[in-house]
Image (cartoon, grey):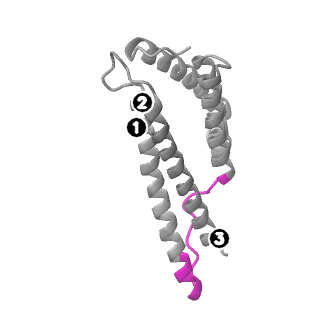
Amino acid sequence: MNANEHAAVKDIILGSSFIIFGIVVCVLTQYLPEAVYDPLGPAFIPRLLGLACIATSCVILFHGIRKKMAASGARGKSRQEKAPVLFVRHPKSALFAMILFFLYILALDTGISGFRTLTTLFVLLLGGMLIKISRQGKAIQTSLILIALSFTLSFGLYYLFTQVFIVDLY
């Protein structure tokens, strides 16, 4: 199996996995209680994110299948030119990001800490991982921007959910 076929198989597995994850999220939101005062209900955002996950995963799956078919067809032909690499893939980083996301949701669900603290840590860890991967720009400047972004995001979302959407975040 050459590198193109290997990348295509990874895309197919990743797309299929996230389609299943999106379906599970959509199914589990059916069991959330209905809201009395909110017309959309508490299941609206998780269901919308599940559907967005399914839609984007279908695109990944489609491209993976298309690449797999192209790689299978190109296997019989001799390769005269090597295509330039458009971007570098980081499957371990993607797996780490997915595990970090599940740990964030689990920590929120179990009540280990508050929303603001966990969101700040989540954004710092995920952003730090992405900064390390990109290795572009000045490390100190990028880190300061990441710290400011994590605090702004966590406190801003906390304010938005508690004061605008009237969602009780512990």
Whichever of labels 1 and 3 marks the residue nearer the N terminus, that label is: 3
Closer to the camera in the image, 51 or 96: 51
Residue 48: mark in rendering:
1
Side of 120 where 56 appears, left or right: left
User: Badge 1: how crowded within 10 Å, few (<14), some, or many (20+)?
Assistant: some
Residue 3: mark in rendering:
3
Q: Nearer the viewer, mark 3 or mark 2?
A: 2
**Could you say which quadrant of the image residue 84 lies in?**
bottom right
Name the residue type under label 2.
Ala
Residue at 60% across / 66% down in the picture? 9
**Could you say which quadrant of the image residue 118 lies in?**
top right
Q: Main secondary structure of the magenta part?
A: loop
Q: Nearer the viewer, mark 1 or mark 2?
A: 2
Q: Is residue 83 above or below residue 166?
A: below
First to last magenta residue range: 71-91
Closer to the camera in the image, 148 or 15: 15
Q: Is residue 83 above or below residue 121?
A: below
Label 1 SS: helix
Whichever of labels 1 and 2 marks the residue nearer the N terminus, that label is: 2
Across and down, in percent, residue 154 comes to 54, 21
Label 2 SS: loop
Name the residue type under label 3.
Ala
Residue 43: mark in rendering:
2
Residue 66 appears in the rendering = yes
Residue at 55% across / 72% down in the picture? 83
Residue 138 appears in the rendering = no
Determine whether label 1 and label 3 are within 8 Å by CB.
Answer: no
